[in-house]
Amino acid sequence: MLKRSLTLAGHRTSLALEAEYWHALEEIARIQNVTVPVLLGRIDAERTTHNMSSAVRLAVLEYYRNRSDLADIST
């Protein structure tokens, strides 16, 4: 687990995720041309679960599922 400190919605917080999730967040942010904190802010604003780490994991999973669905259609 890697723990990082960041500011979300004007508040300092920390988030602990596996390295693979941090790498995925960096990739998604790069593709969407935003920073990781901006991406995390979006996830935070839209989450339906109380736990931010869980919300991030679910958002990453959903992103890659949707991306995979699009790749299957185009082949």
Image: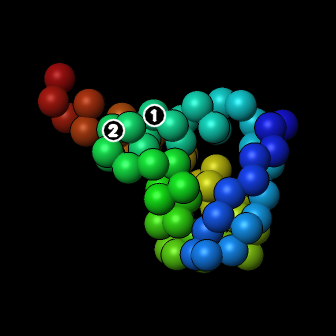
- Residue at 45%, 34% in the rendered image: 27
- Gap in angstroms between the C-alphas marked 2 and 1: 6 Å
The image's colouring method is rainbow
Q: What amino acid does circle 1 point to?
A: Glu
Please indicate, yes or no, whether residue 49 appears anywhere in the rendered image.
yes
Quadrant location, the N terminus = top right
- In the rendering, at what x and y percent does residue 57 appear? 64, 50
Residue 15 pos. (x, y %): 76, 54
The residue under label 2 is 31
Which quadrant of the figure contains the C terminus? top left
Q: Is residue 69 above or below residue 71?
A: below
From the viewer's perspective, tell me whether residue 18 is left or right of residue 33: right
Say which residue appears at 62% left-offset and 55% top-offset. Answer: 56
Horizontal side of residue 13 vs 72, given as left or right: right
Label 2 CA crowd tier, 10 Å (few <14, some 14–19, many 20+):
few
Identify the residue at image location x=58%, y=75%. 9
Q: Nearer the viewer, residue 4 or 69?
A: 4
The residue indicated by pointer 1 is: 27
